[in-house]
Image (cartoon, rainbow, N blue to C red):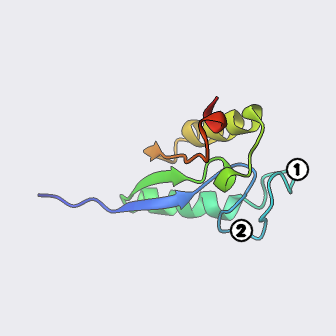
Amino acid sequence: MDWVDVNLVPINPQGAHIHTSVETWNAASDMSHLLPVLKQIQVMRRNGHSVIGMKLIGNGDSTKPEDREKSMRFTLQSGLVDAAVTGFKSTADIA
């Protein structure tokens, strides 16, 4: 059996609850705060690691459906993740 290294990485374009200095939803108007995270994911990929994106909707901070869709599109279309997981507090979050 071959083992695969898998990294769970918080990722969303707003930088909410990911490993950056920005900790609030939509705090920055550009994505410069996200670049170090994206670069690290690229290193993981070059090293043959699989990446699962998480916290796509900022740990539930996103309340607008269009923001949630933006985050999911960004993450899934980035080409940096193999899969993504999202959580929700209630079924209204996924409507």
In the picture provided, is 64 more to the left or to the right than 87?
right
Q: Please state which of residues 66 and 38 is positioned toward the viewer in this rendering.
A: 66
- The structure residue drawn at horizontal position 79% and vertical position 54%, both measured from the top left corner, is 25
Chain-order first, disc 2 or disc 1: 2
Q: Amino acid under label 2?
A: Thr
Q: State the mark number for residue 44.
A: none
Where residue 90 appears, x then y in whole percent?
61, 42
Question: Is 28 above or below relative to 57?
Answer: below
Q: Is residue 48 above or below residue 21?
A: above
| 85, above or below 27, in the image | above
Dot 2 lies on which element?
A: loop
User: Which residue position holds label 1?
Assistant: 29
Q: Quadrant of the C terminus?
A: top right
Between the C-alphas of marks 2 and 1, the distance is: 15 Å
Image coords of residue 44 (percent x, y): 46, 62
Is 50 displayed left or right of 85 in the figure?
left
